[in-house]
Amino acid sequence: LQLEPAAMAHRPDAEAPLLGKPDAAFPPPPANHNKYPFFCAVLASMTSVLTGYNVAVTSGAQIFMAEDLGITDAQIEVLSGVINICSLVGALLAGWTSDRLGRRLTIVLANVFFLVGPLAMTLAGGYAVLMVGRFIAGVGVGYAMVIAPVYAAEIAPASSRGLLTSLPEIFINTGVMLSYVSNLVFSGLPVHLSWRVMFAAGVVPTVFLAAGVLTMPESPRWLAMKGRIAEAKAVLDKTSDTPAEAEQRLLEIKDVVNSGSARGSEGGGGAWKEVTTKAGVRRVLAIVLTLQFFQQSSGIDSVVLYGPRVLAMAGVTSNTLLLSLNVLFGVAKAGSILIAMALADRVGRRPLLLASTGGMTASLLILGSLFAAFAGAKDDAAVAAVSVAAVVAFVVAFSVGLGPLAWVYSSEILPLRLRGQGAGLGTAMNRIMSGVVTMTFISLYQAITMAGAFYLYAAVAAASFVFVYACLPETRGRSLEDMEELFHTNSRSNLSIERNKEISNYPAAGLACYVILALLGSRRLAGEAATMKKEDDLESPLLSDGEPAPADAKGSAYALVCALLASITSIIYGYNRGVMSGAQKFVQADLGVTDGQLEVLIGATSVYSLVGSLVAGWTCDSAGRRRTIALSAAMFLAGSAVTAAANGYAALMAGQLVAGVACGFGLVVAPVYIAEMAPAGSRGFLSSIPEIAGNSGILLSYIADFALAGLPTTLNWRLMIGIGAVPPLFLAAAAVLAMPETPRWLVLHGHPDEARRVLARTAGDADRRLQEIVASVQEATKQAGSGGKSSTGVWREILLRPTPAVRRVMLAILGLQVFQQACGVAAMVLYAPRVFSHAGITSERAVLGATVLLGAAKTVAIVIPLFLADRLGRRPMLLASAGGMAASLLVLGLSMRAPTASWWAAATCVVAAVAFMSTFSLGFGPVIWMYGSEILPLRLRAQGTGVGTAVNRVMSAAVGMTFISMYEAVGMANSFYIFAALSTAAWVFVYACLPETKGRSLEEMEALFDAGAKPSPQATLP
């Protein structure tokens, strides 16, 4: 390296020494700057005021909340930091929403969340409502932090983009300061009122801001992506410094759009109307809803979640034995479901469903009879053994048919145009009934005895047998496109009636022989046992299908791998659902949770999953099946983490809320994805995998319960639940991004060539299958009156197969986002009163006053980048900021070393904290958002910003939710030394890896980061 850091930082064209300098020269700045984009950016960035306010208002309000509601330190730690975890939801959705609805409407949506969340907190009567309000506000934070920089970057001319993209961060800090002022001003009110007014002050501006945003123009780049070139040109004429610049910007944007780098998406509605108006569709939907109703109302969750209770009442007294038997149930459930996987495409759906529902009825009757005959029996080994056998039989019977095949059958009979919405409704029904069973089981058996409860479930199982026999036709071997014709047929063929008459003569013997012999591999003997020809199918006497379509070749290994990857979400779902079965005893012992609370807690996941299941259909159709799976995994991670960290019932409920929404997403999308990927000949096999994976997850949860039961009560249940946060992070995220999108979704969104490439790897006759899918989509488009295109491959390009330029861009963005939060700014924003108290400031009002001073310094300092970012450049400001942060954090740590409280230690602490906030606001506060939003290519901008925001929120949550624990463990001084070390690492990262972007157009950025733009003797980013 030839230049000293100081000289390097002050060069106007300073480049990263590890990233070669490109050829492009800096354009001369225009003489006059257009004021119109400034006002647009200001208006868009006003939402960021609410971001800062809502994040920081708890800093002072927590003092009064703790006194009023009796909230502990641990609960405050979770409450303060959980907004960052919850913001992941908004951050990950914002990219899709901004591409789908537009930048402007996404800002309006963020304001809606900021209205509802703080209002809920204002009216909260307990910790649970506070957590719900915090969750909603967190989603708004995620949306706002993604969309405001994107809009500002896209509306601004190159000459003032640095200034305008700084505005969101400036307004965030303004909101932080206003929250501190609010804390101080309202601290004199009565305790029960003060903190409520602090939160309520953030509610009023949202309505006016949402209305104001609607008056500003849409982003010209988004308009061009949607093909609205004339509108884009009109906006560019108003937001550029010169007409020539407007023309140049338009040409660059059009070139990107026309080259296929960016695609818009648009679609129509009509799906819900069709559901209610077409007889065939209504019939399909009725079957889907009824199947899902019977699957849960037969009582499976009473065993999955309350198995230890059931066996304890049957005479099993040892906790170790109870958890061991729980593992046995999991093994039986996971193992028997392999039978359905193997037989679904050989035997058919109807025989397995009939065998399943019959077996469930018999085992539930036996279980109920045992409780009726031997009620109150203690230490009776025979009764306990038969009870265990009956429970195992029930679980096995459920798993060979009704468990997996309800999802298989539902996902394959729904028409393509309604698959997302229909699957969402089916999942909603499933989750409602699951919630009813899990939230009433304890009350039910206490009211009508355990025997009465199982008799009731047996009656429901018997009704499900009748329903399957009377109303469900066979679907084995049919293509998805054939299903609608099947369910539109009302006539009954003589062959179909005759076959069902023969089967009905001996449903138990014939059907049992058919299933058993088919499992052994003898199709001929199995066919004779059921008096059917080798290729015949069981038909419904009330709904027939005509001749079955020819089956495709067996699914390829590629289709199997895709199904396995999609099913990872089901493993996570199963683990989350089953882990409370063994963990509940320890949760009760540790946190004092009552039976009634436990009942609600366990069933709440099903209720909350309604949100995910109802939204999942829309998300699947709009964002794609693959991306919906990724969203589900991310939410599982958040939910498990919150629950595992809970120190009270309210936090447990909050974690279950997030996990429940993820359950809804996962239950909808995995079956839909696999059904659309699989060839007809192996669709039953592949479509069973999610249920197998779900049961494997339940088994793993039981094993975890058993293995960890010997740990201390305060730790074991947290580890049981916390393990569920690992697979989403290390498996689902990477796996989902390696999967292709389904061919049907690709065709639906105008990508037939890509669809054919997928079909070539998953179907025996790709051309024929493609023709069928295209015809189905065309018919669906004609009937629904809608069509559209959607960009694909964005996430793949960002995270899986990036070009060297994109890889460098994403490394720069993610590195900046990690370092921004890892330096400890969230600790200061959220816990400044604690820091000042620790330094020796004892007066509550003085503490809040010092906090206001901190916010004022942060807000004033952040104005400086407004004027310097486009004059000095981004690199010099980031380098100066990181260096100042490291120095001030070292001083702050030293001030905490004072052996006794003294005025000089307190004063040094305040001065160092102000210096830290000021230097942070000079660069790392606003510039990273500016830098990130401008270096991303247009085709990746919204999604890339979402990824960066998600990383930012994770790091912020990590700091916000661990700071109290951290300083209690290593000391306050050492905590700030750690932050100082991370700030030093941030300086090195900026110096080595980030090039200057000042004065460049957005369309030039990819070339800037492209290593091939100009050979360089210096090393480049990996």
Image (cartoon, rainbow, N blue to C red):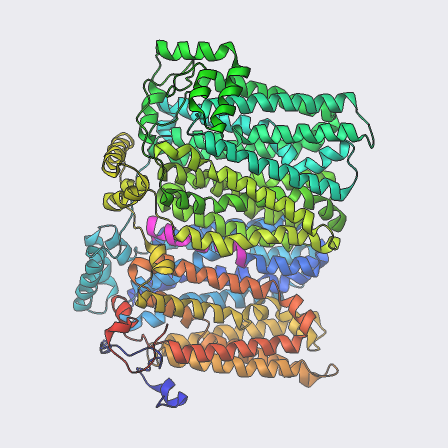
Q: Is residue 904 above or below residue 541?
A: below
Q: Is residue 56 above or below residue 578?
A: below
Q: Is residue 210 left or right of residue 117?
A: left
Magenta-colored stretch includes residue 95 = yes
Say which quadrant the C terminus sits in.
bottom left
What's the magenta region? 84-102
* Residue in the foreground of this view, choosing between 270 and 407: 407
Examine the image and state in which quarter residue 347 appears: top left
Is residue 261 in view? Answer: yes
Counting from the top left corner in percent of width and height, residue 563 is at 42, 43
* Residue in the foreground of this view, choosing between 713 and 36: 713
Residue at 47% x, 13% y is 503
Q: Main secondary structure of the magenta part?
A: helix
Is residue 46 in view? Answer: no
* Residue in the foreground of this view, choosing between 720 and 109: 720
Q: Is residue 683 above or below residue 486?
A: below
Residue at 39% x, 90% y is 4
Magenta-colored stretch includes residue 954 = no
Residue at 42% x, 59% y is 947
Counting from the top left corner in percent of width and height, residue 482 is at 31, 26
Residue at 73% x, 44% y is 585
Counting from the top left corner in percent of width and height, residue 159 is at 28, 73
Counting from the top left corner in percent of width and height, residue 746 is at 29, 43
Say which quadrant the N terminus sits in.
bottom left
